[in-house]
C-alpha cells in the first residue's frame, strides 16, 4: 500500500513536470506570449494578439492611446482578417459594445482612409457596410465596426465614445 501510494504521488509529480516542460516548449516554439487579456490570432492572413474592449468607452484618440500603452495599436482591418473579427464581435457584450474603433483614419482633406500602419483602405473594400463610408456632414474621419450595421465597417465622428479592438504584433 505504501509503495503504491508513493508511486502514485510520484506519477502525479512526473506528469506535472512533463506538463510544465511541454507548456514552456510550446511557448518557445510558437513564440506565443500574448499580453494579459489578449488572445492569439493565427490565420492565413497574419499572426498577432488582440483584445476587445467593450466596457471602457473612449473616443478614437484615447482608444488608440490605450492600445499603444499596451504595446500595440488599434486593430488594422484588412479584407482578409475582417470577417474573423466580425464573427468574434458577435459574442462580445459590454456597456459600449455597439461599436468598436479600428485602426484607420481619413486624413484632413483626404479622400481615403489610411491605416495606423500607413496603408490605404479602398472605399470599395469588402468590409464596408453598403453606402459607407458616407462622411456625414464631412466630419466622419474614424473607422469603426458597427453592430447596427451587422458589424460591418462605418466611418464615424472620432469624438464618439466607443469600444475598440487592440492589436499587438508578435
Ligand atoms: Ca458613416
Image (spheres, helix red, strand yellow):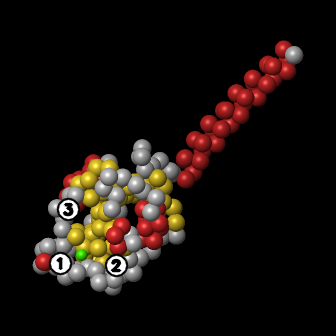
Which quarter shows the N terminus? top right
Q: Is mark 1 within 8 Å of ligand 1?
A: yes
| Crowding near the residue tagged with mark 3, few <14, some 14–19, many ≥20 C-alpha atoms within 10 Å | some
In the displayed structure image, the side of residue 114 where residue 17 appears, left or right:
right
The percent position of residue 129, horizontal first and vertical second, equals 34, 78
The percent position of residue 120, horizontal first and vertical second, equals 28, 77
In the displayed structure image, the side of residue 3 where residue 54 appears, left or right:
left
| Residue 153 appears in the picture as rendered | yes
Which quarter shows the C terminus? bottom left
| Residue 118 appears in the picture as rendered | no
Q: Which circle's residue, 2 or 1, is located before the other in the chain?
A: 2
The residues bearing labels 1 and 3 have C-alpha atoms spaced at a distance of 14 Å
- Say whether marks 1 and 3 touch (CB < 8 Å): no
SS category of the residue bearing label 2? loop
In the displayed structure image, the side of residue 17 where residue 92 appears, left or right:
left
Residue 136 tag number? 1
Residue name at image x 42 percent, y 44 percent? 36
In the figure, 69 relative to 12: above or below? below
Query: Residue 135 appears in which quarter of the rendering?
Result: bottom left
SS category of the residue bearing label 1? helix
| Crowding near the residue tagged with mark 1, few <14, some 14–19, many ≥20 C-alpha atoms within 10 Å | few
Q: Which circle's residue, 1 or 3, is located before the other in the chain?
A: 1
Residue 160 tag number? 3
SS category of the residue bearing label 3? loop
Residue 129 tag number? 2
The residues bearing labels 3 and 2 have C-alpha atoms spaced at a distance of 18 Å
Amino acid at each position: 500500500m505504501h509503495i503504491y501510494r508513493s508511486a502514485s504521488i510520484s506519477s502525479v509529480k512526473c506528469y506535472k513536470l512533463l506538463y510544465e516542460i511541454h507548456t514552456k516548449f510550446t511557448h518557445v516554439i510558437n513564440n506565443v506570449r500574448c499580453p494579459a487579456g489578449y488572445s492569439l490570432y493565427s490565420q492565413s492572413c497574419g499572426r498577432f494578439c488582440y483584445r476587445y474592449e467593450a466596457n471602457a468607452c473612449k473616443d478614437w484618440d484615447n482608444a488608440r492611446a490605450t492600445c499603444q500603452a499596451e504595446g500595440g495599436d488599434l486593430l488594422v482591418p484588412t479584407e482578409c482578417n475582417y470577417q474573423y473579427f466580425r464573427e468574434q464581435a458577435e459574442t462580445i457584450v459590454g456597456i459600449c459594445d455597439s461599436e468598436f474603433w479600428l485602426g484607420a483614419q481619413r486624413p484632413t482633406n483626404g479622400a481615403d482612409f489610411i491605416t495606423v500602419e500607413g496603408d490605404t483602405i479602398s472605399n470599395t473594400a469588402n468590409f464596408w457596410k453598403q453606402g459607407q463610408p458616407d462622411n456625414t456632414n464631412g466630419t466622419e474621419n474614424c473607422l469603426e465596426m458597427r453592430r447596427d450595421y451587422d458589424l460591418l465597417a462605418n466611418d464615424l465622428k472620432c469624438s464618439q465614445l466607443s469600444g475598440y479592438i487592440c492589436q499587438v504584433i508578435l
